[in-house]
Amino acid sequence: MASLLGVIIVVGISMYNENLNVGIIAIAFAIGIGAIFAGLSASEVMQAWPLDLFMVLTGVTFLFGIATTNGTMEKLTGNAVRMAGGNTALIPLILFLLITLITTIGPGNIATFTLMAPVALAISERIGMRAFLMSLLIVGAAEGAAFSPLTPTGIISTHFLSKMTSQLASLGQTLGNLDTLAWKIYFNSMFAQLVANVGGFFLLGGWVWLRRQRSIKLSIDEIAPKPEPLNRAQWMTVGCIVLLVCLVILPGLPVSRDWFPPTVMNLIGSGRSANVGAIAFLLASFLLICNAGDSKTAIESMPWSVIVMVGGMAILIDVMDKAGGMNALAGMISAISNPVSVNGVLAFVSGVISSYSSSSGVVMPMFLPLVPGLVEALGGGNAVAMVSSINVGSHLVDTSPLSLFGAVCVACAAKSEDKGKLFRQLLIWGLSMSVVGAVLCYVMFGLLAL
């Protein structure tokens, strides 16, 4: 129980002071709890640092740090928005699809959102759409695609899923191909975000706005000025991004797996599974050697805060598990749920905590390792459904201005917007998503067993 109390204190600190990197505090607590309650030395505790996860996150975020800082992503975005021409009704759809695509191929939800939110909210003023509606749309797109196996958040989810494979196997649950499961979790998240945030967009004024656009035509140059053509470095970056996606996806497909001999697979991964981090390091090095990127600015753009949070919390949760705290927490949750309702309970609890804390840096590392213990304590349940419930519940609430996403929306809203009103709207919507997420996950993953 002492280790569980330590984790609760660390999570409470993260909710109270969002400017403090809770990963550092988590490591300190892990050292203390490990020494006092688990008989672990500081050296043994530090060995729990998730090195494989760290390497993958570093490689992926560095490659896309190059793509962002050398202007490639900005020009691709500008050209994509201009595809709407003078039809303003197409712009929300293009922005949604663009954010979904960019998030999916590797930068992840945080990097894509911070890149796209200023553009989208500036455009919303020019086309007469309320910032609140645009915020629902772009947050829904970024968070829906957040769990792509190519993105940092998806990588974190898959990492914890792979760690629980042997435990679940001993309980009679065989997960099967992890790459397939990772994409299933991705589509589960996408569907939930479509129902909640995109559904909210249409219900709260988006449909009325779309109908009004039938009689409105604007010059695309007023909405999105034409960017300069891609230069040599940017074309090389585009090529590397396309190659990254191909090298990650194709080796796992039956139709194309024979294209990759053992030597190539050893270079980009192992067996028939590609390692997105290894591929990213290879491609990023190629871009640097060809002078297509600046390593210093790319490193500065990387989400080091999240990486440290994830690593620190992973160490603390590992110590908590060895000290018996994970079994205690699983027992508490199983006492108020059954194999069906546990999905709603997990989504609600993770959503409430995520409203005031980091979804991927704190909530996921804390709750995902609970899944095997919950399956055992409940005497059943779907492990993948529980993982999806935690992921969906923790990310549906991110429209709240207490999170990075909501805060960026308020900061980037046009001067003509009432930012106090926007803050209240996003706060109410974001907090309500903890309940909506619980209901959605109960129905989707519990009753319907999607």
Image: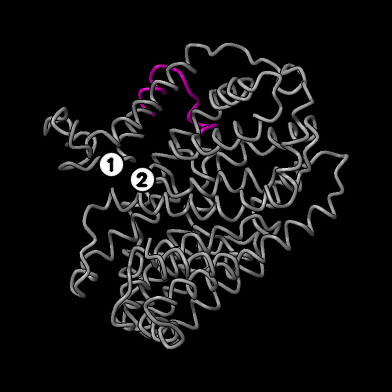
Residue 302's spot in the image, x, y percent? Answer: 51, 41
Residue pointed to by mark 2: 56
User: Which dot, 2 or 1, sits closer to the camera?
Assistant: 1
Q: Quadrant of the C terminus?
A: bottom left
What residue is at 39 percent from the left and 42 percent from the top? Answer: 150
* Pointer 2 local density, CA inside 10 Å: few below 14, some 14–19, many at least 20: many
Give the amino acid type for the residue marked by disc 2 in the picture.
Answer: Val
Query: Residue 181 versus residue 414: which sits nearer the camera?
Result: 181
Q: Are marks 2 and 1 in contact (CB under 8 Å)?
A: yes
Residue 250's spot in the image, x, y percent? Answer: 25, 33
Q: How many marks?
A: 2
Horizontal side of 171 relative to 153 (left or right) equals left
Indicate yes or no whether the magenta region holds residue 287: yes
Question: Does residue 38 appear anywhere in the picture?
Answer: no
What residue is at 61 percent from the left and 34 percent from the top? Answer: 95
Residue 383's spot in the image, x, y percent? Answer: 33, 67
Q: Considering only vertical position in the picture, is 283 above or below 425?
A: above
Q: How far apart are the two marked residues, 2 and 1, measured between alpha carbons?
A: 8 Å
Indicate yes or no whether the magenta region holds residue 450: no
Q: What's the magenta region? A: 284-298
Horizontal side of 421 relative to 10 (left or right) equals right
Q: Quadrant of residue 267?
A: top left
Horizontal side of 343 relative to 48 (left or right) equals right
Query: Residue 100 versus residue 159: which sits nearer the camera?
Result: 100
Q: Earlier in the sequence, mark 2 or mark 1?
A: 2
Residue 351's spot in the image, x, y percent? Answer: 56, 67
Q: Quadrant of the N terminus?
A: bottom left
Residue pointed to by mark 1: 275
Give the amino acid type for the residue marked by disc 1 in the picture.
Answer: Asn
Question: Dot 2: what SS?
Answer: helix
Q: Quadrant of residue 36?
A: bottom left
Question: Does residue 354 appear anywhere in the picture?
Answer: yes
